[in-house]
Image (cartoon, rainbow, N blue to C red):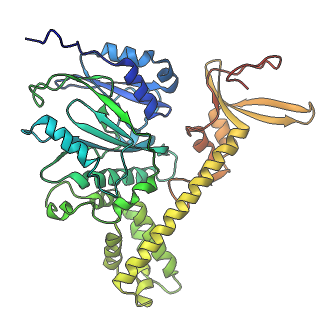
Amino acid sequence: MSNPQQKPLIQDYAGATDFLLTIGGENVQVAAIPYDGGPPTCQSIGWLDMQIGTPAQDFITEHDANNLYFTLNEVPECFDRKPKEADVIAIRGLALDMDPVAGRDLVAERKRIADLLGVNRPSRLPAPSIIINSGRCNQYIWLFGEPLNVAPGTVNPDAMKAQVKALNQAIRMLFATKADKVDSCVSVEHLYRWPGTINRMNSTTKKGLAPALASHVDTGKRYSLKDFLPLLDRPASPTIEEDSGSDDGGPVEWARKNTDKTRLKRLFAPAFPGADRSAMSCAVVYYLVEQGFLDSEILTELMAHRDSAAWHHYQEANRTSEQVLVDIRRLRDKRNAKAHEEQKQAAGAIVGMNADYAIVRLAGKTLVMSTAYDQMMNRHRLSYSRKQDFFDALANVKTPDPNNPGLVIPIAPYWFEHRGRRQYLDGVALAPARSEEHTV
């Protein structure tokens, strides 16, 4: 018999919408899955719709009897199916999903898990940005201040996704002991519980648990990718060696599986007269660092290719293994410093583009508006271009790739997909006689 004093459990529409705004970006994909299993129903909710709030509420109401989830990373606008890795166009952050151990007291387990990411959090792991209470387990998210652009056409999007998965795996391995239950949510397309919605609890795996309203806490912390790279510098936990016979593997295995073998073969080219051995060794180390290899693993790879120009560089200098490791560390630090500087340059490029261009909506079309000074008329004028024409006009203008140090990318697509671009999606009012809010 139900408790007559117990308040009925209802969806928190405002909390659910607020969470979508917290995640940010151009859009957030949400999904409804029957609580006892079945195919998902997916919908993409755009930034303007988040501001209004009604589309999120309508989706929750329509699928009230289902469990509701969101995709952490961004997919294309109007995407209406469960995404795969190739569909992800921007990485918003890293995540960890920790379940209580079956058979233990749920309250005690939830406190233990909270302590693992709180007072007992490993010093190398930054504090979470968002903590989701699903009603049963905790999910932790580390948001990037600036999402990583991995859309088609950017430089090495697959390598960036591989590094993100390696970092997710590294975080997971900090807690993946035989006594803990950590979900394998290392993929970039993973679904997470949507705070503000009701967890209906699967009748088989969560038998006996009452439905609960999922909630979240935003700590306000935001990060860059380099804040997590120390997790890949050495094994994330002693349990990696102890459990080396398992199928899970460690962060290095995730990096290995996603390394471009063809490119690596070229980098490990045999030594030949006149070869720049120093440059080859730098190229090898830089590439393996980008792929998420640990320092010791990079040394192992070098030693495994003793006929390569890269290894001959160290042999000719009579370097010991310890000295090679010092060189690897120096190159890693140099690469990270260069990445930081190029990220600053890329941010400056966005500011410069915003001075001359903006995205506008006119007559139902999305156009690029540019401003130019008309010498004949002695005034500024506006012109409008289609997306492809805009890309073609600036095809020869490049900017440093903030995700891949040393590489450059076309500035037009980078600016067009950047969350900080100047835009007027409600249209443009040309009314010089009066002031109009949100217009130019």
Give the mark count.
0
* Residue located at (26% from left, 52% from top): 120
> Is 272 situated above or below 194?
below
* Residue located at (34% from left, 54% from top): 125
Position of residue 348 in the picture relative to residue 301 (left or right): right
Residue 240 lies in quadrant: bottom left
> Is 44 situated above or below 399?
above
> Is 311 situated above or below 6?
below
Looking at the rendered image, the quarter that the N terminus falls into is: top left
Position of residue 343 in the picture relative to residue 139 (left or right): right
Question: Measured from the top left, where is residue 286 in percent x and y?
Answer: 46, 67
* Residue located at (63% from left, 43% from top): 412
Question: Measured from the top left, where is residue 171 in percent x and y?
Answer: 30, 52
* Residue located at (24% from left, 60% from top): 237
Position of residue 301 in the picture relative to residue 419 (left or right): left
- Residue 335 visible: yes
Q: Nearer the viewer, residue 320 or 374?
A: 320
Q: Nearer the viewer, residue 208 or 121?
A: 121
Question: Measured from the top left, where is residue 276 in percent x and y?
Answer: 52, 80
Q: Nearer the viewer, residue 323 or 409?
A: 323
State the residue lying farthest toward the top: 4
Residue 142 lies in quadrant: top left
